[in-house]
Image (cartoon, rainbow, N blue to C red):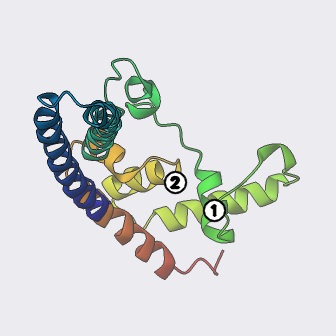
Amino acid sequence: MKELLVEYRQTLKETRVLLSDIEKIIKINEADKSLESKELLIELQEDKKVINSWISNLQYSIQWLSSGKRPGSTRGIERRSVYQKEILTDATEIAKIIESGQVIYNEEESTETDEEQEHFSQVTDAVLGVLTDKECEIYKMSINGLAPFEIAQYMEMPYKTVYKAINRCERKIQNEDVSFL
């Protein structure tokens, strides 16, 4: 994403140079009153409009990529509770994801017995038992679909720290032996 942002900024600079070149040509041709000059002037004005729209779109994209939020949105999805402190977690689903390696689980299609649910609960407790409280909280948020930057905002810590913590949790979980259950 950082490379894309650099490319967008470079393209914006080049586009602004192109716009200034067209504006210079327009100034030169405004003094000439010939028919060809007027036609060229009309085409250059249209080109100027197109280039201005490119610049606007590039600025919008750069702002979005830089901030991670849609520009100009004052009451967008960024302010809703899903990105705030309401995190609902079911330990049973985490165990299913860990044990099966699948990301999708539909509770309506579940035909589990109480014994199977108890087994998953034991697996979850055993697996999450190797994590510290903070790691466990971060990992549960990650499993619930929050991006590392969102978790970082919630936990008030650097993004890279959250990313490393998630990777550390996954390594710990992969190394955990739950075959005794």
- Give residue 118's quadrant in the image: bottom right
- Location of the N terminus by quadrant is bottom left
Q: Which mark is residue 24?
A: none
User: Residue 113: x and y, percent?
Assistant: 85, 54
State the residue lying farthest toward the top. Answer: 75
- Residue found at x 33% / y 41%: 54
Helix, strand or loop for disc 1: helix
Dot 2 or dot 1, earlier in sequence = 1
Query: In screen coordinates, is 55 left or right of 114?
Result: left
Around disc 2, counting alpha carbons within 10 Å, would you say few (fewer than 14), some (14 to 19), or many (20 or more)?
some
State the residue lying farthest toward the front. Answer: 34
User: Residue 55: x and y, percent?
Assistant: 27, 40
Kindly identify which residue carries mark 1. 97
Query: In screen coordinates, is 91 left or right of 155?
Result: right
- Residue found at x 41% / y 50%: 147
Taking depth in this image into account, of 28 and 157 the one nearest to the observer is 28
Do residues under tags 2 and 1 come within 8 Å of each other at their CB atoms?
yes
Around disc 1, counting alpha carbons within 10 Å, would you say few (fewer than 14), some (14 to 19), or many (20 or more)?
some
Helix, strand or loop for disc 2: helix
Q: What residue type is labelled 2?
A: Ile
- Where 152 sits versus 135, above or below? above
Q: What residue type is labelled 1?
A: Ile
User: Residue 106: x and y, percent?
Assistant: 77, 48
Kindly identify which residue carries mark 2. 143
Taking depth in this image into account, of 72 and 15 the one nearest to the observer is 15
- Residue found at x 29% / y 66%: 164
- Give residue 86's quadrant in the image: top left
User: Residue 39: x and y, percent?
Assistant: 34, 33
